[in-house]
Each structure stands twice: as structure tokens, then as C-alpha cells.
Amino acid sequence: MTSGKNLRQRLHYIIFDYDTIPAKAFDLVLIVAILLSVTVVMLDTVRGIHTAYGEALYLLEWFFTILFTVEYLLRIYASDSGRRYIFSFYGIIDFLSILPTYFSIFVPGTQYLLVIRFFRVLRIFRLLKLVKFVKEAEFVKASLIASSRKIVFFLFFVLVTVSIIGALMYMIEGEESGFTSIPKGVYWAIVTITTVGYGDIYPQTVLGRTLASLLMIVGYSIIAVPTGIVSAEMAVMNEKIESELSSPCESCCSTTEHDEDASFCKICGKPLT
């Protein structure tokens, strides 16, 4: 009983820990296996490769499925709460990523659902923890959250703009130019304002081309505005961090040069507020 408990604890440290060498090795091996599995899924969708190496890819797919099944069961066994892991985001993704291969035995064609396995690539964020990118990730996350309301308002403005322009183009160009409905006009406006320009439909009248030209010019700001919003929030947060790091020591030395993770003044040794 004790040996089983010790085994479970050791597995827990290896699978769910971040700092130990076995845990880092496990994460690296897992991420490599996920990337290889995703590569197999991608190659299997190429007709020429599937025709030439379909059997080998099928065997590899079963190898990775069994490997991830064992990993999934070990995570349930080693978790502090198996139920919590099963219904967690990663637990659901891990479970869904192994189901299609088993279902393909009984229902042909369900193996195409293996695209769900691409979501397992999100586990690469655990690798970011290994290389100490947590603070950088939190900085970007906080900046996006701080600017989310402004971005949502901007996207709402863009949505209203393309709706109006799409309706106008439907009235100006009509069905003979390919604008068979207002939704198709809105589609054209979105493609144009984002500077994608598929060219499947385009205005042919002078008025329509004039409106399209104005929309193309506006399109350049569509890319710049969200970038500027997030960059401004990053600048504000960076200034706040620098001001916190440069707060003077309350002792007689009054130095303002502190390390980011410092709890004590490096000059006089007094605690920092």
C-alpha cells in the first residue's frame, strides 16, 4: 500500500510538476510526441503521401494514440483529484484527442476528427514555464485584458462600417456585378477593409469603385488601431512597473535601483515596501 502511494506521488511530481529534472524531461518528451503526432495527421491529409505511406502513417497514428491513452490514464491515477483533471480544459482535450482513432474501428471516417489533436499543442505553454517566460506571458495577457474593452468597441465600429458599406454596394452594383445580396456585399466589404482582396467579386461602376477606394484607404487603419491600443497599454504597464522598481528606499540610502524580484535594498539591506 505504501509502495503504491509512493509510486503515485512520484508520478505526480513527474507529470504535474514544473521544476524537477524528470518533470522537465517528461514535458519535453510529451511535447515532441504531440508535435510528431500532429505532423502525422497533417501528412495523412496529403493525397500523394497517403497513397504511398498510408499504412505506415496508420501504424504511427495507433502508436501515438496508445501512447497518449497511457499518458491520460497515468494523469488520472497521479492527479490529486482525478475527477477535477477529467473535467478540466486539458483533461477534456486529452480525452477527445484519443477518441477518433478508436471510433474509426466502428465508424469509418471518424479518424478525420483527429484535428482535435491540434489543441494538444496548447500544452507547449508548459514548456514556456520551463524556460521562465511566465512573467512575459502574464505581461502580454494583462495588456490584452486591459485593452479588451477598447478593442471590442473598435471591432463593433468595424462591424457597423462593413454592414453599411455592404448594403451600399448592393444598392450601387446590383446582381449583375456579383453583389447578389447584402450579406455578400458585407463579405466583400470585410475582404476589402482587411486588405485581403480575394478578387472573386469587385465593383464595376464608377461610384462603386470610388467607394471601394475609400474603403481600401480606411483598411490600413484597421491593422494599425488594435496594434496601437495594445501597444499603448503595454507602455502604460511598463511605466508602472518601472516606477514601482524605482521607488526610493525609505532608509537613509534612498537608492532607487532595485532588482525586479528584490525584497530588500541591495545597498542598506532594509525591507522594501
Image (cartoon, helix red, strand yellow):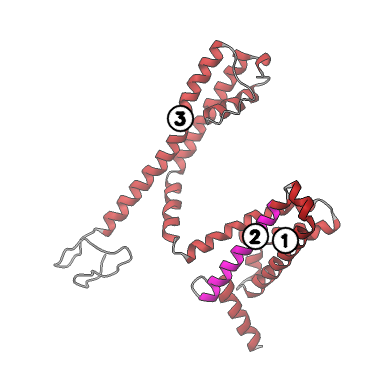
Q: Which residue is mark 3?
A: 220
Whole-angstrom CA distance, mark 2 to mark 3, is 39 Å
Residue 14, image x, y percentages: 57, 75
Q: Is residue 37 part of the magenta span, yes or no?
A: yes
| Residue topped by disc 1 | 98
The residue most toward the bottom is 2
Instruction: State the residue lying farthest toward the left.
Output: 252
Side (left or right) of 228 relative to 110: left
- Name the residue at the top extreme: 206
The kind of residue on which mark 3 rests is Tyr
**Where residue 224 appears, x then y in whole percent?**
43, 35
Task: Examine the image and state in which quarter residue 83 appears.
Answer: bottom right
Q: Which mark sits nearer the N-terminus, 2 or 1?
A: 2
Q: For the residue labelled by badge 1, is the local secondary structure a helix, a strand or a loop?
A: helix
Residue 88 visible in the snapshot: no
Residue 23's quadrant in the figure?
bottom right
**What residue is pinned by disc 2?**
36
- The three-letter code of the residue at mark 1 reads Ile
Q: Residue at x 48, y 72 (%)?
A: 19
Find the magenta span and give its range.
Answer: 21-42
- Residue in the foreground of this view, choosing between 235 and 60: 60
Q: Nearer the viewer, mark 2 or mark 3?
A: 2
Q: What residue appears at the point 52 percent right and 26 percent down from the top-left corner?
A: 161
**As drawn, is 168 to the left or to the right of 242?**
right
Q: Quadrant of the N terminus?
A: bottom right
Q: Amino acid at mark 2?
A: Leu
Estimate how packed mark 3 is, as few (under 14), some (14 to 19) or many (20 or more) residues with alpha carbons within 10 Å.
Answer: few
